[in-house]
Image: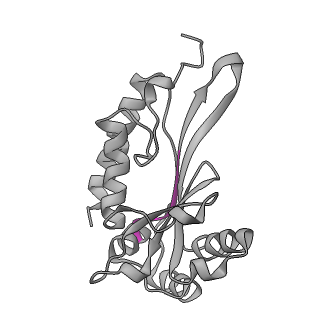
Amino acid sequence: MHSRQQLEIWLADAASVIAAAGSTLNVEAKPGADAQSIRIAEERVGFAFPSSYRSFLTWYDGMKLGIPMLLPHGYTFESTLEIFGTAQIAEATRVLSDAWGREEEFIDLFVFADYMDSNHCGFDARLATADEYPVVDIFHEDPAFWREPIAASFADWLQRCFEAVINERNYFTYWLPANLDQIRAFDGS
């Protein structure tokens, strides 16, 4: 896993790119979780967390990244990516499973992130290698695509999210089509 220092560099670099595009990066981060909180969350989910996600949880017990945007006709919203902490991961997995009534689809999947309350990322425990799980796009509208890997690990997913902003002027959701050039400054420029 990358270090907490690397994550802080990515956050600063992403904030600079987003500022150049006319917006701001809002970051809400909870203090890191202790080993007992992580163990309890793993028991609730039914799987040991991948080591890279476990490392992240020791630095931040959840993080929400938001980019406020002004759309045509004055409509504003915040594009958000939320990485769940220990208190959220089991509940998020249960809620998504209940929403579809397809618990069997979630037997070996668990949700760890949400983009804009509609696109979820999770781990596929069936495909575990060593102490990592691939990240899959759990787009809740179509379960047929839930098994499509989008990253080899949480560390890979996190790096690619930040590289999408820093290098490609995309949103954090590198697996979805978008571009920061769509941002308009709140002052209308």
For residue 45, side relative to residue 159 (left or right): right
Please say if 69 is above or below 1: above
Q: Is residue 152 magenta?
A: no
Q: Nearer the viewer, residue 188 or 36?
A: 188
Q: Residue furthest front?
A: 144
Q: Nearer the viewer, residue 33 or 78?
A: 78
Please say if 12 is above or below 56: above
Q: Residue furthest top?
A: 189
Q: Image point 49% across, 86% down: which residue?
A: 36
Residue 126 location, x and y as percent? 41, 82
Quarter of the image containing the N terminus? bottom left
For residue 97, side relative to residue 165 (left or right): right
Point out the stretch of residues depicted in magenta: 58-65
Residue 127 location, x and y as percent? 36, 79
Please say if 6 is above or below 103: above
Residue 18 location, x and y as percent? 42, 31
